[in-house]
Amino acid sequence: MAIDEHLAARVRSDLTERGIEWQEKRMFGSLIFMVGGSILVGVRGGGGLLARVDPAESADLLADADPLYVQVADMGGKDMGPSWLDVHPDAVADEAGLTHWVDAALRR
């Protein structure tokens, strides 16, 4: 499934506006945005975001979000652990949602 190019452009714009340098790589079926050599977020096939967050903050982020919109990411039927959250496209449909999840990833 192709990545959501519109969402990728929004992530690029968000990082540019913050003055953050990044690299992009394709992996995990996503377009991954890396900052300082570490994965920040990935734009998933079909939309949505793979967010790498501080595992100590993961439970709070999940509790604050609708479980239909955010859950621990799964790869091939295996839970990827608390650092990896799969964010539904609706949760990043507006700028406030995207900013929230990029902020969370940057705190890691």
Image: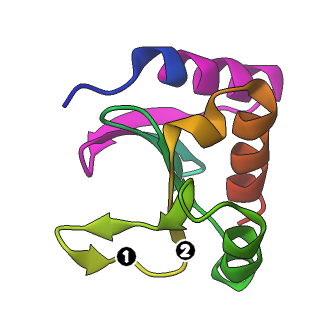
Q: Is residue 97 left or right of residue 52?
A: right
Q: Residue 51 in the image: x percent, y percent?
A: 55, 55
What is the secondary structure assignment of the residue under circle 2? loop
Q: What amino acid type is highlighted by mark number 1?
A: Met
Q: Which residue is mark 2?
A: 83
Query: Is residue 82 part of the magenta span, yes or no?
Result: no
Q: Is residue 86 left or right of residue 105?
A: left
**Residue drawn at point x = 49 percent, y = 23 percent:** 8
Label 1, on which residue?
A: 80
Q: How many marks?
A: 2
Whether tag 1 and tag 2 are in contact, CB under 8 A, the answer is yes
In which quadrant is the C terminus drawn?
A: bottom right
Residue 84 rendering spot, x and y as whole percentages: 49, 67
Q: Image quadrant for the N terminus? A: top left
Seen from the viewer's position, the closer of residues 7 and 106 is 7
Q: What's under tag 2, amino acid-wise?
A: Ser
Whole-angstrom CA distance, mark 1 to mark 2, is 8 Å
Up/down of 36 relative to 16, above or below: below
